[in-house]
């Protein structure tokens, strides 16, 4: 789903989770193909800017579920508006890729992850974890 040919191949991969990172997910899980909420503030602008430096890839728990991939693509196109298409300013959100397997990324943004620093976190820390929008 790209109009820019092979240019993305030379860029490092940035993986974005969908729910809680791009989709605000305020209604919670309604099914893989039901995405009722608006974008997280700044998500559209962030992805547009990131496309200049990264191959932006969306990988989600929805990615391998029936209807999930298509629903995410449709949702992004609906919320992208004029930002969907490439412009003189650069790529459009049509260049964001949706995948069914997590690719080897330079970095991943996920609201339900902890950076591993080489030191194992405590089990109580893990058990009490809350994503940014639930804290």
Image (cartoon, helix red, strand yellow):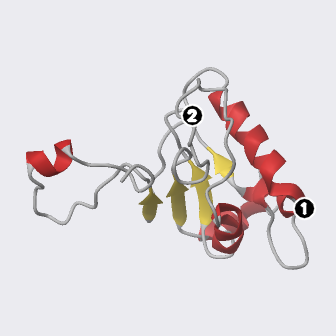
The residue singled out by tag 1 in the image is 82
Mark 1 packing: few (<14 Cα in 10 Å), some, or many (20+)?
few
Could you say where residue 52 lies in the image, as x and y percent from the top left?
Answer: 69, 75
Q: Residue at x 32, y 49 (%)?
A: 130
Badge 1 or badge 2: first in the primary sequence: 2
For the residue pair 82 and 52, the one nearer the viewer reads as: 82
Q: Residue at x 81, y 75 (%)?
A: 90
Mark 1 residue element: helix
Determine which quarter of the picture holds residue 56.
bottom right
Of tags 1 and 2, which is closer to the observer?
1
Q: Residue 33: give its label.
A: none
User: Does residue 85 appear to the left or right of 27 in the view shown?
Assistant: right
Q: Residue at x 65, y 67 (%)?
A: 42
From what the image shows, is residue 63 above or below residue 114?
above
Mark 2 packing: few (<14 Cα in 10 Å), some, or many (20+)?
many
Marks 1 and 2, how far apart at CA: 25 Å
The residue singled out by tag 2 in the image is 63
User: Does residue 76 appear to the left or right of 78 in the view shown?
Assistant: left
Indicate the quadrant containing the C terminus: top left, top right, bottom left or bottom right: bottom left
Determine which quarter of the picture holds residue 93.
bottom right
């Amino acid at each position: 789903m790209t109009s820019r040919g092979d240019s993305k191949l030379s860029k490092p991969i940035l993986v974005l989770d969908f729910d809680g990172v791009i989709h605000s997910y305020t209604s919670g899980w309604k099914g893989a193909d039901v995405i009722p909420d608006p974008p997280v503030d700044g998500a559209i602008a962030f992805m547009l800017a990131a496309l200049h430096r990264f191959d932006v890839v969306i990988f989600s728990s929805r990615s391998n579920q029936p209807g999930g991939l298509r629903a995410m693509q449709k949702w992004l196109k609906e919320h992208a508006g004029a930002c969907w298409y490439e412009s003189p300013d650069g790529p459009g959100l049509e260049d964001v890729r949706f995948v069914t397997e997590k690719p080897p990324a330079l970095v991943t943004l996920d609201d339900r992850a902890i950076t591993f620093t080489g030191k194992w976190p405590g089990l109580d820390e893990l058990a009490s974890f809350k994503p940014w929008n639930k804290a």
